[in-house]
Image (cartoon, rainbow, N blue to C red):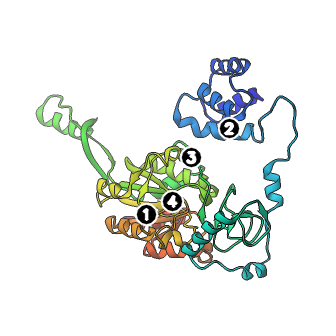
Amino acid sequence: MFVTFFTELKSAGVPVTLREYLTLMQAMDADLASRRVEDFYYLSRATLVKDERNLDKFDRVFGHVFKGLELLGDGIEAEIPAEWLKKLAEKYLTEEEKKQIEALGGLDKLLETLRKRLAEQKGRHQGGSKWIGTAGTSPFGAYGYNPEGVRIGQDESRNKRAVKVWDKREFRDLDDEVELGTRNIKLALRRLRKFARTGAPEELDLDGTIKGTAHKGYLDILMRPERHNSVKVLLFFDIGGSMDWYVKGTAELFSAARAEFKHMEHFYFHNCLYEKVWKENRRRFQETTPTWDVMHTYPHDYKVVFVGDASMSPYEITAPGGSVEHYNEEAGVLWMERVTRTYPACVWLNPVPEREWPSTHSIMLMRQVMGGRMYPLTLEGLDRAMRELVR
C-alpha cells in the first residue's frame, strides 16, 4: 500500500524522491504515527511534500489511496461505518409529501425555534418532524427534508435548501497549474485583451535597431518594454458546498486566467459576497480581507468576474444574518450592489446549465442583482461574458 501511495504521488506530479520515501518508512518503523490515520497523514505530508503548491495534489492522492481506513486499537474490532448508518437513515419523500411540509415562516422564526429546541431536547431523535435529528422532516438536523432548515452533522448538501450550516467546513484553494482539457477556454478569454508596452526596456526592438543603424551609420541597438496584455482582472470564486461538483471546470478557468492575464487578483467567498473575502481556504477563518479594502485597493478600471453556482437560500442574498456560516450584519445584496457600482465591467459565470436556472430562486435573484449579466460557464457563455466586459 505504501509503495502504491509513493507511485500515485509521482503520477499526480508531486516531486517525491526515494530518499523521502525511505525516511517515511523509518518514521513508521519508529511508530511515530501511533497507528492513527490522522497522525500518519501529517507525518507523510511533512515528509513527502516540499512545496505548499503540491498540498492539494497530496490530499487528493491520500484520500484516494487510504480511503476508508479507521483507527486501530490494541485488538481488532469491527464496527459498522457511521456513513452506512447515515445513508440508511436518509429521508426520501415523494413530491406530494414534500408539498405537505411547510417552512417555519422566515429566518428569524427558524433561528428562534432552534434555540428553543436546543434548550428543550434531551436525547437523540430520528425520523421526526420537531426535534433535532436525522431522517425526518424537522427543520433541524441531517439526511431529512424541509424547505427551509438548519443543516447539522451532514457531510454535503443534498437538496440545496439549508438556510444555515452548523458544521465548520474546510475547502481547498484552486490549483493554478492544472492542465486544461481544452485550449478553447484560453481562446475565449483572449477576447479580453488590450496590449500595451510598459515597464523596463527588456526586449530587442528589431525594427528600431535597423532604422537607427541605417540612419546613424553604425550599430544602434534599441530596446523596448515587452508587449503584454494590460487588462486588469479581479476574480471572485465561490468555493465549497455545492460548488464541489464544479471544481474541475472552475480550476480550468482559474488556470487559463493565470496564463492569459498578467494583472490578475483573485479572492474566495462562499455562496454570496459579504463584508470579507479570503485568499487561502486553509486559513479562511484566520486571514480574511475586508471587502471594503478590496474595493479601495483595486481601481474601477479592473474587470470583475464572479464564478459561482448561486445556489443557496434566498436569505443569504436578501437578509442580514442570512449567511450559512456567520452572522452578516448587512445583506449580501448590498455588498453585491456596492461592487457592481464600483466596477462597471462586472459579470457572473455560473457552472449550472442555463436551462436549469429558472428552477432555483436564488439563481434568478442573483441574476437580477447582476443586471442580467450572468452567463453559463461554457465556451459560448465565456465568449458572451468577454464581449460584455469589453463593451
Of pointers 1 and 3, the one earlier in the residue sequence: 3
State the separation of the CA atoms marked 2 and 1.
35 Å
Relative placement, left or right, of 97 versus 210 is right
State the separation of the CA atoms marked 3 and 4.
19 Å
Pick the quarter of the image with the C terminus. bottom left
Mark 2 or 4, closer to the camera: 4
Mark 3 or 4, closer to the camera: 4
Q: Position of residue 109 (x, y in %)?
A: 57, 75
User: What's under tag 4, amino acid-wise?
Assistant: His
Q: Position of residue 208 (x, y in %)?
A: 21, 40
Of pointers 2 and 4, the one earlier in the residue sequence: 2
Q: Mark 2 packing: few (<14 Cα in 10 Å), some, or many (20+)?
A: many
State the separation of the CA atoms marked 4 and 1.
34 Å
Identify the residue at image location x=58%, y=63%: 351
Q: Which residue is mark 4?
A: 326
Of pointers 2 and 1, the one earlier in the residue sequence: 2
Regarding mark 3 in the picture, which secondary structure is present there? loop
Instruction: Depth check: give the residue in front, 264 or 276.
Output: 276
Could you say which disc has been placed on residue 61 in the image?
2
Q: Quadrant of residue 346?
A: bottom left
Q: Quadrant of residue 178?
A: top right
Instruction: Depth check: give the residue in front, 209 or 217.
Output: 209
Identify the residue at image location x=49%, y=49%: 285
Could you say which disc has been placed on residue 172 in the image?
3
User: What's under tag 3, amino acid-wise?
Assistant: Arg
Mark 2 or 3, closer to the camera: 3
Regarding mark 2 in the picture, which secondary structure is present there? helix
State the separation of the CA atoms marked 1 and 3.
27 Å
Q: Is residue 162 visible?
A: no
Mark 1 or 3, closer to the camera: 3
